């Protein structure tokens, strides 16, 4: 990429129907290339930029993910890099490292295609699956940044670059750790079981001033995996549950899926119009915004200190990140109620609403759009689910996202690479304890999911909780060669894990 110049590009605007007045202007400022779009009658869908230059096909390239990753991140030779890469990428020849991407919280979904003859960027500025009605607005779609580093490792280069992309990360003031009941309960839980979990977490964190969390995951609400966000008969008093957690020195957390509901009283006009029988709420509808605010105020009023909100990308756009390529949705011909905003603007408005109503609660985004939630959540789940039953899933999802998105930790948010799931003897402890050890020294969030632990597990969990309170330096050493790095440099010492 050493021959690339930000200013030497070609540009194309694609609209829904004829382009009558959609115009793109580009301005340089502060080392960034700012791309603006305006239109009055036209309905823009995509802006495309192309840079032509030659690159060595032996360069190794690492891209990011739309939302969570799915065990699929890793370096590829440039000549084999037939993929669209959301948000940013790193290219390295082993000595020099080039990073190219857009600043966080853009107003379009941006992806890159990098090949030996140049680079293409697609800015998806649609409203859902239709062109946006800007109504004369001049909108900053994205700010492109190019950096070259030669005085550091590729990992350090990417971490520096991530800090350049995010001006104001929203970070917790203390290390976040504790329990989550999903990977042993899988939604089958009740009030008394949670209290048992809380006592275990308190015991494991005995003597640690920074108290652990216990997150009540899916299963406490009326219907499986959807709203309305009211407790079922197994959880008779959510406020009392939070109080009892606090009484034993554990901080209460809770899970919700804000945009899907089985409430029969929801008006049709509140639904996202993609078809199908399921009810996905359109957050651009004022009534839906009022409902979301009411739900969040109720949960905050119960006394919960952490909110994990889930499924928003899927519920908004109808796809998982792993099934997407160049753009954020594969479905066309649909739009949100407010057609004057791009999909990226709508996502950020939703995140801001949740942040505003969360008060002092910490926020974990799960299935949140990574580049849009930076600065709007404290913690972000950067990979798909690990497991309490399947070691291969924990290894593939957890280790992969920790290695290849660790550079975002402390730069965008606190990374959450997901839980250590402990469910009987489904996963050999000799394997799971390695994942626990790596997480505890990674500087990322550390959550374990278990309702009982034998003496060895108790000893290892206590040690991990203690280790998580201390600052560590950590770098994956063999990350250019494998999707599951085994060799790590931790506090200056090489450590090998056998996954």
Image: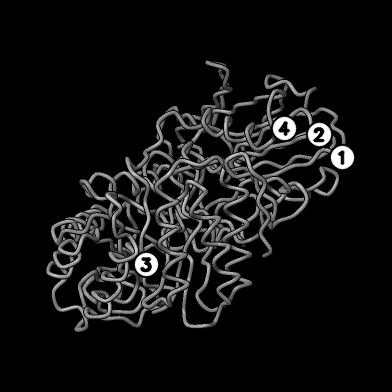
Quick check: marks 1 and 4 in contact, CB under 8 Å? no
The mark total stands at 4
Label 1 to label 2: alpha-carbon separation: 7 Å
Q: Badge 1 is on which residue?
A: 58
Label 1 to label 4: alpha-carbon separation: 21 Å
Quick check: marks 3 and 1 in contact, CB under 8 Å? no
Q: Quadrant of the C terminus?
A: bottom right
Residue 50: mark = 4
Residue 21 visible to the viewer:
no
Q: Position of residue 201 (x, y in %)?
A: 32, 66
Q: Quadrant of residue 288?
A: bottom left
Would you say 471 lies left or right of 476 here?
A: left
What is the secondary structure assignment of the residue under circle 4? strand
Q: Position of residue 351 (x, y in %)?
A: 35, 47
Label 3 to label 4: alpha-carbon separation: 45 Å
Mark 3 or mark 4: whose residue is earlier in sequence: 4
**Which of label 3 and label 4 is nearer to you?**
3
Neighbours of disc 3 within 10 Å: few (<14), some (14-19), many (20+)? many
Quick check: marks 1 and 2 in contact, CB under 8 Å? yes
Residue 17 visible to the viewer:
yes
Quick check: marks 3 and 4 in contact, CB under 8 Å? no
**Which of label 1 and label 4 is nearer to you?**
1
Label 4 to label 2: alpha-carbon separation: 22 Å
Would you say 222 lies left or right of 102 here?
A: left
Residue 180: mark = 3
Q: Badge 2 is on which residue?
A: 93
Mark 3 or mark 1: whose residue is earlier in sequence: 1
What is the secondary structure assignment of the residue under circle 3? strand
């Amino acid at each position: 990429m050493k021959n690339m110049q930000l200013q030497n590009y070609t540009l194309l605007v694609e609209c829904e129907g004829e382009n009558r007045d959609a115009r793109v202007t580009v301005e340089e400022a502060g080392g960034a290339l700012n791309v603006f779009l305006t239109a009055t009658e036209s309905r823009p869908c995509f802006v495309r930029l192309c840079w032509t230059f030659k690159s060595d096909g032996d360069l190794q390239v690492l891209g990011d993910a739309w939302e969570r990753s799915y065990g699929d991140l890793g370096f590829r030779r440039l000549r084999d890099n037939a993929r669209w890469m959301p948000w940013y990428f790193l290219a390295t020849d082993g000595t020099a490292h080039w990073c190219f991407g857009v600043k966080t919280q853009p107003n379009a979904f941006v992806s890159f295609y990098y090949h030996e003859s140049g680079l293409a960027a697609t800015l998806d500025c649609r409203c859902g699956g239709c062109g946006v009605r800007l109504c004369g607005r001049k909108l900053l779609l994205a700010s492109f940044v190019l950096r070259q580093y030669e005085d550091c490792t590729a990992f350090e280069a990417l971490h520096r670059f991530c800090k350049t992309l995010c001006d104001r990360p929203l970070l917790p003031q203390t290390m976040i750790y504790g329990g989550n009941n999903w990977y042993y309960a899988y939604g089958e839980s009740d009030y008394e079981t949670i209290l048992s979990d809380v006592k275990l977490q308190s015991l494991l964190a005995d003597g640690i001033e920074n108290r652990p969390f216990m997150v009540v995951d899916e299963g406490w609400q009326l219907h499986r995996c959807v709203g309305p966000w009211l407790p079922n008969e197994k959880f008779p008093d959510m406020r009392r549950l939070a109080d009892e957690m606090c009484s034993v020195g554990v901080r209460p957390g809770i899970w919700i899926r804000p945009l899907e509901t089985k409430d029969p009283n929801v008006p049709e006009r509140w639904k996202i119009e993609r078809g199908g029988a399921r009810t996905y709420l359109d957050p651009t509808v004022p009534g839906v915004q009022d409902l979301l605010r009411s739900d969040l105020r109720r949960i905050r009023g119960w006394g919960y200190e952490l909110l994990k909100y889930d499924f928003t990308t899927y519920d908004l756009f109808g796809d998982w990140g792993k099934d997407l390529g160049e753009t954020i949705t594969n479905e066309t011909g649909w739009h949100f109620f407010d057609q004057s905003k791009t999909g990226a603007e709508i996502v950020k408005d939703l995140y801001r609403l949740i942040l505003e109503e969360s008060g002092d609660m910490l926020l974990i985004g799960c299935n949140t759009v990574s580049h849009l939630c930076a600065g709007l959540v404290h913690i972000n789940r950067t990979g798909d689910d690990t497991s309490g039953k399947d070691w291969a899933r924990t290894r593939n999802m957890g280790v992969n996202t920790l290695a290849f998105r660790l550079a975002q930790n402390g730069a965008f948010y606190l990374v959450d690479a997901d839980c250590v799931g402990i469910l009987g003897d489904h996963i050999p402890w000799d394997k799971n304890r390695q994942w626990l050890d790596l997480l505890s020294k990674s500087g990322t969030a550390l959550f374990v999911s278990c309702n009982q632990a034998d003496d060895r597990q108790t000893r290892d969990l206590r040690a991990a909780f203690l280790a998580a309170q201390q600052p560590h330096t950590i770098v994956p050493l063999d990350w250019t060669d494998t999707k599951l790095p085994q060799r790590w440099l931790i506090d200056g010492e090489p450590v090998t894990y056998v996954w």
